[in-house]
Each structure stands twice: as structure tokens, then as C-alpha cells.
Image (cartoon, rainbow, N blue to C red):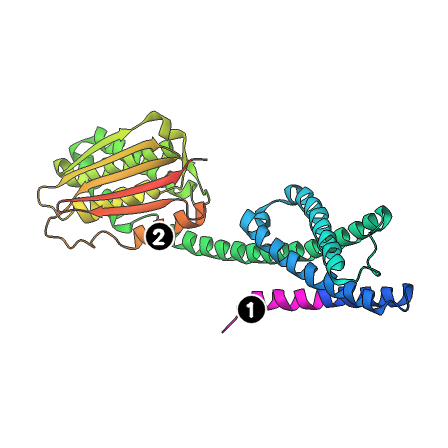
Amino acid sequence: MNVPRPRRAYWFCQVIGWLLYGGVNAAIFATAWPGHEFVATYNVLVSCAVGAFYSDRFRWVIHKRGWLRLSLLALLPRVLAASVVLGALLQVTAILLAKMVFPADVWRRPVLATIVIYLFNFSVVFFGWQLIYFGVHLFERSRRLEVERWQAEAAARESELRYLKAQINPHFLFNCLNSLRALISEDTGRAQSMVTRLASLLRYVLGTSHDQLIPFGRELEVVKDYLALEGMRFDSRLRTRFDVVPESQAIMVPPMLLQMLVENGVKHGIGPLVNGGDIAVSARLITDCLEIEVDNSKDPSAHPAEGQGIGLANARERLSVLYNGRAALEVEPGMDRFIARVRIPLP
């Protein structure tokens, strides 16, 4: 049977530690009480065996109660109380076993001073045991958290690079410029309005490149600018709806997240449709999270996996890094609709 490495290490330390404690006890007894080898041997064996048993059972309590997740301030009183309780248990067990093992002419009821001395000694031993045990686990936890932090930072940098590369879709920019060129001669006022929206969108993209989170209301304004610009190309083929509760606009969200979902819906859903379609953006607060939904028309004959490209994969990775797995991005590809739903935990 293969024993896990941490458990082998635990038992190795457990056996070595209690044997060392027994060796020290044996040396003290041999020096202080020569001629009492039987009593000395009994005390050493019992203190080692019972101490190892109680400490191992206490280890189970530590994991059952979740003490390894406690802060030092919360852990200290528990360690002190446990040391006294374990010391008392070891002393009571040793006295009861001695009464059963020793003959009547050898057994003597311990006096109060002896009880206090042994209780103090046993409590100190268990306190030291806990210092070593919790110290090893705290060191392992800090090392593990350090590794996870570096991994998260590396993933965040890699995700940020992909995010920056995907911020401005060149095709969208070229389409906007071509549409603006045609619009200038037809409707100067509208062309000026579209140039303002495009400038606002570009300013937002460049200005949030180093921001991890921004207010959802700001992201929503940029999405409206984006859809207005796409409306130049699609004209009446693109219809939009918004259902956003006011309370959601102050919630902090990753920049370009909603914009990417909307762009996905326009490009993969509405773009291939001859008669166009509609895209609906909604946001509401449910329980302890912000739920954002982008619902767009799609070609019924399109493959169900279409529209789930690198943009959605990057968005999932960004959410995972920023929220430690507490955020989610789900998609529901239907017959003629495609829904992308994001849940972001509230602070």
C-alpha cells in the first residue's frame, strides 16, 4: 500500500519526536532516581505511547475543526487550552495505568505538588508539539500561496496581453471609417455625431488598458457608442434593446467585457443574417452577484459552437484571474438565439 508522502513525513516526525522525548525522560529518571528502573521504564513508555496517541487524535480534531485555516490571533488561545487539556489527559491516563500495573506496595497516590509539576511538563510538551505542527503547516501554506500568487500574476499578464491585442477589432475600425466617409456627404450632422462616438470609444479603449475594474455604467455607455457605430453599417438590420437596473451601474466590472460580448453577438449572430436581427443587453442584481446578459439573434442553420471563439475564452480567463473562480461566464446557444450570461460577485 502506498502511503502519501505528507503522511509518511508526519509519522516519521511523530515517531522520532516522541522517541527523543522518551530518551530525555529516561536520562532524567536514571539520574534523579537510581535504582527505580521499573518505574522509570514505565513512565517513559507510557508518556511516549499515550502522548503519541493523544497527539495523533488531536491532529484529527485540528483538521475536523478547520484550525489550520485560522489566523494566529484566533489560533493562540486554542493552542494554549489544548495544551492544558492534553496534558491533563496524559497525566490522568498515566496515573490510572500506573494504579493497574504497579503492585500495591509500589503504588503511591501522587501528591498535589507532583500532579502540578507533571501537568505543567506535559502541557509544555504538547504546546511544543503544536508549535512544530502548526509551524510546518503555516510554512507550507505560505509557500503554496506564494506559488499560487506567482502563477496568478503570470496568468494575468498573459491574459492582459491577449486582451490588449483584442481590444480594437481592425475590421470594425475600417468599417466605421468607410461608413463615415460615405456619411459625410449624405448627413454631415450625423457624421459628426458618429466621429464623436468613435473618438469616445477609442479614448475608452486606450484609457482603460491598465484598469482591472471600472464602473459598469461607463462600460455601458461605450457599448451604446459601439452599437451606434455599427448601426451605420447595418442600418435597420440592427435593432437594440437595453434593460439595465440603475443600481448595477456603480458595480465594478472588467473593462471591455460587455463590449466583447456585444461585439461577438453582432459579428457572429446578426452579421450573417440577411434581414438582420436584434441584440438585447440586460443587467440586474441577484442575491450576491451582478448578472449581465447579452441575447442576440442568430442563424438557425449555424453550428451551435459558432460564436464561442477566442473572445469568450479570454473573457473566462480574465474573470477567473480577477475573481479567483467566483465569477462565471455561461453561454446558451439556441435555435435562433445566442445568450451569453456573466455573473460577477458583489464586493
Q: Among all residues in the image, which is located at the extreme front?
A: 104
Q: Which residues make up the magenta segment?
A: 1-17
Residue 203 figure quarter: top left
**Which is more toward the observer, 114 or 343?**
114
Q: Which residue is mark 2?
A: 314
Question: In this rendering, is residue 336 above or below 55?
Answer: above
- The answer to whether residue 10 is magenta is yes
Q: Which mark is residue 5?
A: 1
State which tag comes first along the sequence, 1 or 2: 1
Q: Secondary structure at mark 2?
A: helix
Q: Position of residue 186 (x, y in %)?
A: 15, 33
The residue at 24%/37% (across/down) is 227
Query: What kind of residue is marked 2?
Result: Asn
Q: Position of residue 309 (x, y in %)?
A: 27, 54
In the visual, does 109 lie left or right of 2? Answer: right
**Which is more toward the observer, 9 or 73?**
9
Does residue 140 appear in the picture of this structure?
yes
Question: Dot 2, how many residues are within 10 Å of its Cα: few (below 14), some (14-19), or many (20+)?
Answer: some
Residue 42 figure quarter: bottom right
In the visual, does 181 lie left or right of 287? Answer: left
Residue 158 figure quarter: bottom left
Q: Secondary structure at mark 1?
A: helix
In the visual, does 151 lie left or right of 320? Answer: right
Query: What kind of residue is marked 1?
Result: Arg
**Which is more toward the observer, 235 or 64?**
64
In the visual, does 23 lie left or right of 329? Answer: right
